[in-house]
């Protein structure tokens, strides 16, 4: 795995691929007799969702939800709502990463309030140690540490979502000074 003073590759493309197959199998087993509606949280989760649904052997539908955060408490609002109702549907929320857990908590309540028949969550990564609220993640890709991660959907100031593997930021100052410090290395020559 590649190493720079400011960032280290921590999860390879190969490991990401094999884990998503396992998650897809688990969902296929649990949803044999109910068609899941995947509620994909924009933007970072799009890559995970695309890989996940292709590994699920059950009639599936996919819909998208955009969130924004405002105010000091980081209140969560809807920037773009789902196209279809979730009433009576078996919803699987698809998130890129569970951090404090607040986003997932709000989303689960939103789906329940709208009358979903069931709600579960798939998250590509889980920063369990940073959780401030108790919220279940039924399908968890990788448990990760506290480091800020980029790649495979995860961004720093909009950059790095397209990387095929996951990198941990080792020197946050370097990324603050120059958000493209890593991409300059990766995409040069
Ligand atoms: P939560 O409400 O604190 O759980 O926030 C989760 C959201 O924070 C994710 O959907 C990401 O957009 C963002 N996030 C948390 N940790 C990271 C990270 O390490 N890299 C990039 N984005 C992150
Ligand atoms: Mg982000």
Image (spheres, rainbow, N blue to C red):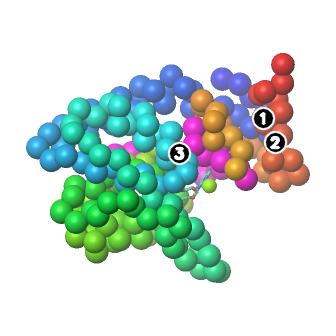
Would you say 143 lies left or right of 189 here?
A: left
Residue 19 or residue 154, whichever sits in front: 154
The residue shown at (74%, 37%) is: 7
Which mark, by number, is residue 72?
none
Mark 3 lies on a secondary structure that is: loop
Is 50 above or below relative to 2? below
Task: Report the magenta stretch's main SS.
Answer: loop
Q: Identify residue for label 2.
A: 180
Residue 29 appearing in the image: yes
Of badges 3 and 2, nearer the viewer stands 2
Earlier in the chain: of badge 1 and badge 3, it is: 3
Quadrant of the snapshot with the N terminus: top right
Labels 2 & 1 near each other (Cβ < 8 A): yes
Residue at disc 2, CB closer than 8 Å to ligand 1: no
Q: Residue at x 57, y 68 (%)?
A: 68
For numbered disc 1, what is the local secondary structure? helix
Q: Is residue 173 left or right of residue 73?
A: right
């Amino acid at each position: 795995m590649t190493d720079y003073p400011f960032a280290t590759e921590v999860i390879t493309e190969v490991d990401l691929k094999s884990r998503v197959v396992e998650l897809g199998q688990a969902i296929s087993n649990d949803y044999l007799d109910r068609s899941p509606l995947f509620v994909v949280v924009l933007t970072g989760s799009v890559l995970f969702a695309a890989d996940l649904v292709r590994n699920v052997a059950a009639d599936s539908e996919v819909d998208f939800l955009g969130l924004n955060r405002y105010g000091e408490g980081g209140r969560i609002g809807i920037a773009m709502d789902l196209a279809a109702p979730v009433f009576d549907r078996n919803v699987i929320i698809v998130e890129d990463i569970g951090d404090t857990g607040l986003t997932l908590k709000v989303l689960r309540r939103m789906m329940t309030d709208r009358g979903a028949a069931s709600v579960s969550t798939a998250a590509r990564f889980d920063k369990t140690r940073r959780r401030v609220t108790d919220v279940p993640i039924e399908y968890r890709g990788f448990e990760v540490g506290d480091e800020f991660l980029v790649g495979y959907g995860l961004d720093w100031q909009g950059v790095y979502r397209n990387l095929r593997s996951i990198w941990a930021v080792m020197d946050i100052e370097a990324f603050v000074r120059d958000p493209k410090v890593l991409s300059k290395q990766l995409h040069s020559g």
